[in-house]
Amino acid sequence: MKKGIRATTTKDIARRANISEGTIYRHFLSKDELANEVFEKTSQVLYLFLKDRLALCTTPRERLDCYVRSLFDFARKDHKKYSFLFAAHQTELRRQTRKKTKHMDLLVEIIMQGQMYGAFRAVDRHLAATMVLGTITQTIFYLKNGDIRVNFADIVPEVQASCLKILN
């Protein structure tokens, strides 16, 4: 992901994978098809990671806090997968990925549950989810770039509180 999806050539991919460039085309019709396949599989990894973590929480507030912490944990634990997912979603694969972001569905579900129980205010769930996810991903972005010099243990509660403010 150093160059981005569009700038990375099949030759670059083959070299990194220690295979011939032709091998890629035996399995995929194009680089875009390969990128979509990688996105799908990586998105599923994130979804299952979040879903497993969220299964341990019950209240909407606990689930929101868990979602935030888990996304930070995933970004640290699997930083290459995280970077690929969010770079793909924000850039070249934007059109194809919009309907495939299951992690966003989990967040919408948390917000819907919170609204049903009166824990979160009435607001369009998709708008609220976008605002919450933006808060999380932008913080991770600036943290990874070194623009934010705050201890990880301190930043997660701050982001959790900010996300809760969006929903209250």
Image (cartoon, rainbow, N blue to C red):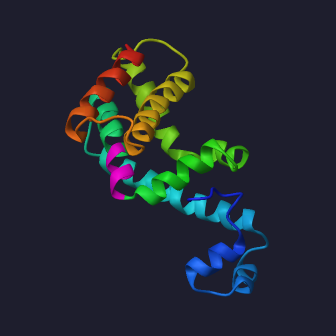
**162 w.r.t. 48: above or below:** above
**127 w.r.t. 35: above or below:** above
> Which quadrant holds the N terminus?
bottom right
**114 w.r.t. 14: above or below:** above
Residue 79: image location, x then y, percent: 41, 56
On screen, residue 132 versus residue 7, left or right, reads left
Residue at 37% x, 51% y: name it: 74
Look at the image and give the residue range highlighted in magenta: 72-77
Camera-side residue: 144 or 167? Answer: 144
Q: For residue 70, what is the image quadrant? A: top left
Residue at 65% x, 43% y: name it: 99
Residue at 29% x, 36% y: name it: 149
On screen, residue 162 versus residue 125, left or right, reads left
On screen, residue 117 versus residue 90, left or right, reads left
Residue 49: image location, x then y, percent: 38, 54
**165 w.r.t. 3: above or below:** above
Query: Magenta segment, principal secondary structure?
Result: helix
Is 75 covered by the magenta stretch? Answer: yes
Is 73 covered by the magenta stretch? Answer: yes
> Which quadrant holds the C terminus?
top left
Residue 141: image location, x then y, percent: 45, 40
